[in-house]
Image (cartoon, rainbow, N blue to C red):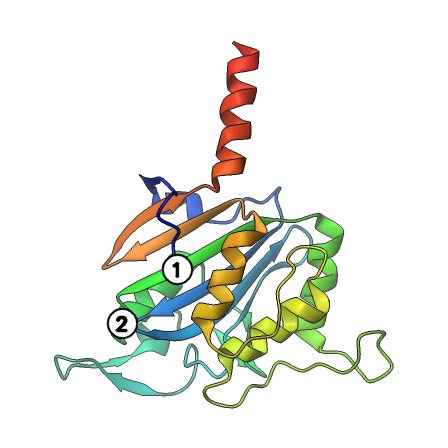
Amino acid sequence: MLPDTWNGNECDSRSLEDDFQQAKLHVMVMYNGPCTHVALRLYCKNEGAIFWDPAGGFAKDNVYVNPENQEFNFDESSNPNSIRLNDVIIKSVPSINQYLVWRKFINTHAAEIFEFNIPQDEAEELWTILRNGTKRSHPKGAFHTDAIGGTCGLSIAKFLHRFADNIVDVKTVFYPHNLAKQLYKQNPERVIIYRDEKLYYYIPPERENKRLLSKKTKQ
């Protein structure tokens, strides 16, 4: 879904690690030809990271077989101490880099990672909703993170539409690539593209133009 007009730069994987002073929301859309999965990672200063993998396989007691017929127990190879509760990783939460390492073993060749810097108070609110869910008495209704297989895109699109409308304005859609198409228009801080183990980052043209103008003014 990457717009043709966006310019790319090589991305240092270290820039994907948590910045302890900046709350961030990452929405990750995975591809193997067509879109295959979407997951969400949230970091806030006081609570740390939380990772939502709706109907995904991270930290499940499964052994997968990759195309070369080699078996990998991902709980052992990527993050053996992770604990999954209602599709949310609540302990030993994977970093984005760890998750990408895990994804490559299940034939994921590409990913779009939308990065949003968000206020700390909003991050804490979203963290609490993901961790605990909400009841019917909540102003936006009941919510839980359990997802039926095949509904990862719908689940995250609904969550963003209902609870993160101060950050992004997206409609509820079913397919992950249709969510990605909308997120490109939401002025992310940057979009990190993963292609066959290589990383690139793209900055929205309007954000890049403001950055260059500010740099020129300071000079």
Residue located 47% across and 38% down the image: 205
Label drawn at residue 61: none
Q: Which image quarter is the N terminus in?
A: bottom left
N-terminal of the pair, mark 1 or mark 2, is 1
Q: Amino acid at mark 1?
A: Met
Asked if residue 218 is positioned above or below residue 183 in the image, the reply reads above
Helix, strand or loop at mark 2: loop
Residue pointed to by mark 2 = 33
Percent x, y of residue 214: 56, 21
Q: Residues within 10 Å of mark 1 (few under 14, many from 20)?
A: few
Spatial separation of the CA atoms under disc 1 and disc 2: 12 Å
Q: Amino acid at mark 2?
A: Gly
Label drawn at residue 1: 1
Q: Residue furthest bottom?
A: 148
Helix, strand or loop at mark 1: loop
Residue located 20% across and 80% down the image: 66
Residue 217 appears in view:
yes
Q: What is the total number of numbered labels drawn onto the structure image?
A: 2
The answer to which quarter of the image holds residue 170 is: bottom right
Q: Nearer the viewer, mark 1 or mark 2?
A: 1
Residue 93 appears in view:
no
